[in-house]
Amino acid sequence: MKYLVKFFVVTFLLAFSTHAFAEQKIVVLDLKYVLNSSKAGKEAQDFLKKKFNDNAKKFSEIEKSLQKEENDLLSKRSELTKEQYQKESNTLRKKVNEYQTNRRASLDKLATLRSEAREKLLEKLKPIVNTYINENEISLVIDKKNMLGGQPEYDITNLIVDKLDKELPSLKLK
């Protein structure tokens, strides 16, 4: 009798939990695609890429100038006194250090801008996803990169991109 009661309790719990899990709706969202393909995301990427290329061009010119100065200094080495050569090489070293500091600061600024743009996008994306979850009674949203497979009708990426484009057409980075 004791085993019979246990059997019915376990069977009831399994049947109930199976029914509860069967009612759950799970969808997939490709977060990388949303961040890269939305209007605001594309605009931010284009802005950051342009800024990076401009900085790279500027620093490339400075680097060529410094290399030319170094070559000139090396060619004049025999003509200059030891003190003059030391003075000019110290000046050149300071210029190189300044160049490296400016370049590092520029790259750090770009990384900060990129991070801020991502945070703004994610900040605007959260309420959109939460609204979609509530309207469609979604139990769970999984990022596509963490998923092995699934049916395409459970992918809500394009719907979210459309809603994000309406909500946030631009990030207005400076």
Image (cartoon, helix red, strand yellow):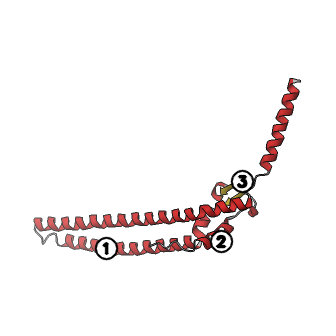
Image coordinates for residue 79, horizontal then vertical, percent: 12, 72
Q: Quick one: label 3 or label 2, which is nearer the N terminus?
A: 3
* Residue depth check, mark 1 versus mark 3: number of the one nearer the observer: 3
Q: Amino acid at mark 3?
A: Ser
Q: Which mark is residue 139?
A: 3
Please report the residue visible at 70 percent of the width from the left and 59 percent of the height from the top. 134
| Residue at mark 2 | 162
Asked if residue 17 can be seen in this view, the reply is: yes
Q: Please tell me whether mark 2 sits on a helix, a strand or a loop.
A: helix
Res 150 → quadrant: bottom right
- The number of numbered discs placed on residues in the rendered structure image is 3
In the drawing, does residue 123 fall left or right of residue 65? right
Q: Is residue 42 above or below residue 28?
A: below
Q: Please tell me whether mark 1 sits on a helix, a strand or a loop.
A: helix
Disc 2 and disc 1: Cα gap in Å? Answer: 43 Å
Q: Which mark is residue 35?
A: none
Q: Please tell me whether mark 3 sits on a helix, a strand or a loop.
A: loop
Q: Quick one: label 2 or label 1, which is nearer the N terminus?
A: 1
| Residue at mark 1 | 62
Image coordinates for residue 169, horizontal then vertical, percent: 57, 74
Disc 3 and disc 2: Cα gap in Å? Answer: 22 Å
